[in-house]
Image (cartoon, helix red, strand yellow):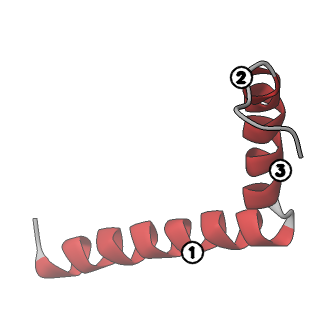
Amino acid sequence: MTALKIILIILAVLVGLFLLTFGIYWFNGDMKLIRFVYEKLQPHYDNIEKDRKL
């Protein structure tokens, strides 16, 4: 491969990663993922026996 092809591939990967992270930011994907995980874990933590009453 020539150096130009390698540079173009690296540039394409970087642009792709930037677009992916920008899309996650734009659509608030990180908080949607955290909410999904939280809702799946909440029943487990609700069923844990507590040592004291609040």
The residue depicted at 83 percent of the width and 71 percent of the height is 26
Task: Name the side, left or right, on which 12 lies relative to 18.
Answer: left
Residue 50 sits above or below residue 38 on the image? above
Q: What residue is disc 1 on?
A: 18
N-terminal-most mark, 1 or 2: 1
Instruction: Bin the neighbour count of mark 2 within 10 Å (Cα to Cα): few under 14, some 14-19, many 20 and up.
Output: few
Task: Name the side, left or right, on which 44 lies relative to 9.
Answer: right
Residue 30: quadrant of the picture: bottom right
Q: What residue is disc 3 on?
A: 32
Mark nearest the camera among 3 and 1 is: 3
Q: Which mark is residue 48?
A: 2
- The CA span between labels 3 and 1 is 19 Å
The residue depicted at 22 percent of the width and 81 percent of the height is 4
Tell which of 22 and 30 is nearer to you. Answer: 30
Q: Which mark is residue 5?
A: none
Task: Name the side, left or right, on which 53 lies relative to 3.
Answer: right
N-terminal-most mark, 3 or 1: 1
Residue 13, x across and y down, in percent: 41, 66
The residue depicted at 31 percent of the width and 73 percent of the height is 10
N-terminal-most mark, 2 or 3: 3
Q: Amino acid at mark 3?
A: Lys
Mark nearest the camera among 1 and 2 is: 2
- The CA span between labels 1 and 2 is 41 Å
Residue 11: quadrant of the picture: bottom left
Tell which of 39 and 47 is nearer to you. Answer: 47
Mark nearest the camera among 2 and 3 is: 2
Residue 4 sits above or below residue 49 on the image? below
The residue depicted at 63 percent of the width and 63 percent of the height is 20
Q: Amino acid at mark 2?
A: Ile
Q: Amino acid at mark 1?
A: Phe
Instruction: Check contact, mark 1 vs mark 2: CB within 8 A.
Output: no
